[in-house]
Image (spheres, helix red, strand yellow):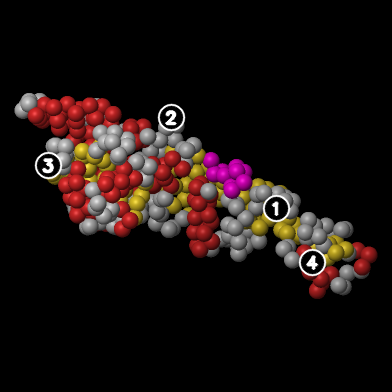
Amino acid sequence: MEEFKKTIQYHPNALNNSLSALPYSKNEICFFDIETTGLSPRISSVYLIGAVYFDGENFQLVQWFADDYVSEKNLLESFSAFLQSFSVLIHYNGTTFDIPYLEKKYMQHQLKSPFPELESLDLFTDIRRQKNWFDTPDKKLATMEKLLGFERNDRYTGKDCIAIYTDFMQKKVFHDKSADDCKKNLLLHNHDDLIGTILCSQFLLYTRCSTVHQPIIKIAEDSFAIQDTIHGSFPLPFQRQLLSKNNDYIGMISFSGQTICMEIPLFHGTLRHFFKDYKNYYYLPVEDMAVHKSVGIYVDSSRREKATASNCYTKKTGTFLPLPDKAALSSMPHFQEEKKSPVHYLLLDENKPLSKEQIQELFYDLQSSLFH
């Protein structure tokens, strides 16, 4: 087995931006990727494990390479020992392939697997969950890193590398100097996979963005805009629809630079606020409104009737903001067109503007509606 160490040389701004997207301390994370001679751990072997960590100043790469057919156990042991310094593993599709593959290899060699002791973040799973985001044919690593502008020096696929590794082993036996070129290509492929994985952490800025918690609002005649600044910077400008949990259109959200902004069309007109405890209300048909029984008892019985769930309301005319779901800003009165209308609205009162806490709550409710 051979072990290689080097400092990752890539655009510092992009790498640091990737770190800013992660919800972990910088010193507890480790990126990893493996290269194998096949998909089945029963009939193939792992010949290369690469790991990247941040030392406080730079990203450092460590690679364990099996330069013979008996080094697999040493690779696994070295990787386990290395992981003792970390608590979070970050990978791209490692949940489906890399981790299950290595766990079976640890079992074959009667070694303890390090994975149960570690938290795992699969960037592929997170990115694929937002399947309609970005105009890409798929969410493969090569596709997403290309979207971010990463130009690989490696020109081979994982499948190509299997043949290159076989060629390496044959040339090594015959002391062919070109075996070193094969090894360099294998290490480079793993190196580029890891850089691509690190860079894809930036997609978390869209799905899990951490803001400075100081959202501001701007209200125009027909629109309501709320925005905040994130820690880090969005690698790509991007815009998509805001939908409620019932998939009703609410507005648009845009990501650009360090700003996340949601712009929502306002509704002008008359809506109803429905009281939940309708059995304690009377409905007044002439006035088309409900009043509590403590008040309605004084209304002539011919002008009142027992309220039902569908007519137990009071009406307001004004400017309303659609909400992402009925749980949003639940401490404030919600308004609807009808009792069963899926969209809930908030009355915007110039004389009673939203508090800072309410603005923050609204911002997070809107943001979370992206990922329902």
Mark 1 against mark 2, which lies toward the viewer? 2
Residue ID for mark 2: 137
Q: Of callouts 3 and 4, which one flags the residue occurring earlier in the amino acid sequence?
A: 3
Question: 10 Å neighbourhood of mark 1: few (<14), some, or many (≥20)?
Answer: many
* Circle 4/circle 1 CB separation < 8 Å: no
Question: For the residue labelled by badge 3, is the local secondary structure a helix, a strand or a loop?
Answer: strand
Question: Is 197 contained in the magenta span?
Answer: no
Question: Is 243 contained in the magenta span?
Answer: yes
User: Marks 1/2: CA distance?
Assistant: 39 Å
Residue ID for mark 1: 336
User: Marks 2/3: CA distance?
Assistant: 38 Å
Question: For the residue labelled by badge 4, is the local secondary structure a helix, a strand or a loop?
Answer: helix
Q: Is residue 226 visible?
A: no
Figure quadrant of residue 81: bottom left
Q: Position of residue 22 (x, y in %)?
A: 34, 51
The range drawn in magenta is 241-251
Q: Position of residue 188 (x, y in %)?
A: 19, 34
Q: Position of residue 72 (x, y in %)?
A: 19, 43
Left or right: 223 in relation to 2: right
Mark 3 against mark 4, which lies toward the viewer? 3
Q: Of callouts 2 and 4, which one flags the residue occurring earlier in the amino acid sequence?
A: 2
Q: Of callouts 1 and 2, which one flags the residue occurring earlier in the amino acid sequence?
A: 2
At 47% from the left and 38% from the top, the residue drawn is 131
Q: Position of residue 115 (x, y in %)?
A: 31, 53
Residue ID for mark 4: 279
Question: For the residue labelled by badge 1, is the local secondary structure a helix, a strand or a loop?
Answer: loop
User: Marks 2/4: CA distance?
Assistant: 55 Å
User: Marks 4/1: CA distance?
Assistant: 20 Å
